[in-house]
Amino acid sequence: MSKTLKGLLAAACAAVVLITMLSGCQMPLKRYSISYTDTFDTVTVFSAYCSSYDEFSEAANAVHTELLRLHSVFDIYFETSSVYKLNSESKLESADKELIELTALGKEYYNLSGGKLNIAAGSLLRLWHQARAEDVLPNADALIKAAEHIDISKVAISDDDIIISDPDLTLDFGALAKGYAADKAAEKAIECGLTSFLLDLGGNIKAVGKKPDGEYWTVGIKNPDVEGEVDSQILTAVNALDVSVVTSGDYERFFEVDGKRYSHIIDPDTFYPAQLYRSVTVIAAESKIADALSTSLFCMSLEDGKALAKSLDAQVMWVTADGICEKTEGFIEYEKK
Amino acid sequence: MKKSKYIADFALFCAVMLIAAVALIAGRSVRSDGTSAVVRLNSKEYAALSLNENAKLDVEGLLTVAVENGEVYILNAQCPDKLCERHSRISKSGETIACLPFGITVEIVGAEYDALI
Amino acid sequence: MKTKKLTACGVLSALAFGLSYIELMLPSLPIPGAKLGIANISVMIALYILSPVEAALVSFVRLILSWLIFGSFTGFIYSLCGSVLSLITMAVLKKTGKFSPVGVSIGGGVCHNIGQLFAAVLFMGRSVLSYLPVLLIAGAVTGAIIGLLVAGVLKSLKSFRKGT
């Protein structure tokens, strides 16, 4: 065999071997996932791309610990939770920093939403929680009575203390807590060095970074009209790049009486579940904003909702009770084509 | 310069290797992480396992499909050659382990959505 | 068919079957379908000292025998697809006159595996296509080995060829 030919063939073989090796040689980031069922009364799934299981495990534990901690602050049923103590004694001295933060946030959103998001509506919400458990509508008089004690101005923050001047007023952070917790938990994951993860806190999504192959974390939004096999009927999907996506819908925690569906989001002005929309999806940079907005907007007119979303730099998609889909311009840009 | 009579043979060998390398790369570049493993028996879907949960599935007593830390492999194969057991663990969408004698395949599929709300 | 040819076919078919039996007893490689294919030695000898027709006959008889004795119908189908493609390829490569038995065997080995993969796709779906790169490499390597063996055998059969 001639020398040049030998050389050529050797080079060809070397090239083949090199290409084959290189194709498998990038430091692979693997996808790991874990789920928890012990926080915020819901299923939490944490998925991340990490260079090792240990790295993932460390971050997942940090996330889980933070979620448990916040759950114990805000859970209204836990007798040892800060909120429980605050509600039963109508005051809490040296309250948790987070509780103060969220109370302040609640007051802020009360103003922003024209009263539609009301963390002081605990007494009203409690009646509906019970109703949902028993599948019967709450007594109309009881609702009116309970609604006499939802005046948020009676909730005051003084340094480290929270004081409620109406003894029958109880706080319920259901509209804000998950979003707030998702933000905090995500911070922990970032502190652990993670650059690509998705936290799904019972439908409250916080996504950070892109996947290693350059793809976005994809969030599918269910079609509220499809019964049963909802997983196969998706309304649309959004590319979640460093944003939070939250949907409030009447197809999650609801109950039916006489064929009529009652969602879990109560309009503080009517005392009854809001009936304007089937679902409201919000995309915002912070999860606490997305969560607060999805609840507020569920009870607000489209016009008011659009204005509020715009002022907070959030994108929204509404599915009205008639099944019509409304989207802000920015929302469309997030959608996967 | 005497040409070896094996030149054409060697060229053919290299050509095949090149095609194999290309096929390997082409297969790899579209691989993304999977989210579930679909088990098929004689081309019909038999079961689907999520890669998020560790699990073991006994397929008609013929072999066991195991999911561990997001990877899938075969155990307890009753086939004569047990090649399926010796296959490396798979986790990327499109990757497959096949047990030819039993007509069983396990393929990783990637879901379209990372979350559904 | 001339008696000598017939006898040769008979001997080669038996040899092919015997070789495939021996192959079953060897430890198998960690790749599905990556058999050494030593029975192919027999088929190739038939191809070189007789003709493609006889080679096909030897191959087919061996497959039938294997099916009857070892009982696998799907195995038979896979092997049949592999053998047909392999034989056509080998006959063509040999005809060009540019390849030695090594090259012909490489072509045969690779195409045998491609044929089998094709059959597997029909039975088990497109997912098995991921085995292609590995099968191509295995086919080429085992083909080369078998080719070298065949070249050696053919050399010592020179006297027989002169006599046909």
Image (tube, coloured by chain):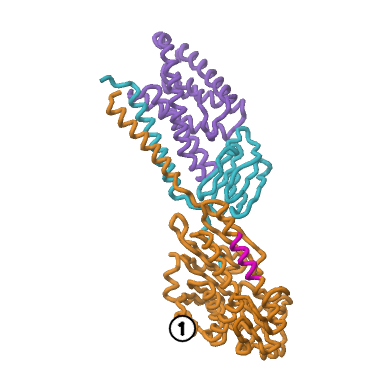
Chain colours: A orange, B cyan, C purple
Q: Which amino acid does label 1 sit on?
A: Ala
The residue segment tinted magenta is A61-71
| Front-most of residues A97 and A321 | A97
Q: Which residue occupies 48% across, 75% down?
A: A316
| Front-most of residues A5 and B41 | A5
In terms of image quadrants, where is residue A184?
A: bottom right
**On the picture, is C9 further left or further right than A202?**
left
Q: Is disc 1 surrounded by few (<14), some (14 to 19) or many (20+) residues within 10 Å?
A: few
Q: Residue furthest left?
A: B1
Q: Which residue occupies 44% across, 50% down?
A: B30
Q: In this view, does C101 lie above or below A145?
A: above
Q: How many marks?
A: 1
Magenta stretch, main secondary structure class: helix
In terms of image quadrants, where is residue B20?
A: top left
- For disc 1, the chain is A
Residue on which disc 1 sits:
A307
In the rendering, at what x and y percent does residue A276 appear?
Answer: 56, 82
| Residue A173 seen by the camera | yes
- Is residue A68 shown in magenta? yes
The N terminus of chain A sits in image quarter: top left
The C terminus of chain A sits in image quarter: bottom left
- Is residue A72 shown in magenta? no
In the rendering, at what x and y percent does residue A117 appear?
Answer: 57, 83
In the rendering, at what x and y percent does residue C97 appear?
Answer: 33, 23
Q: In this view, does A13 lie above or below C159?
A: below
| Residue A233 seen by the camera | no
In terms of image quadrants, where is residue A202?
A: bottom right
| Front-most of residues B83 and A113 | A113
Q: Is residue B98 above or below residue A310?
A: above
Disc 1, SS: helix
Q: In this view, does A108 lie above or below B109?
A: below
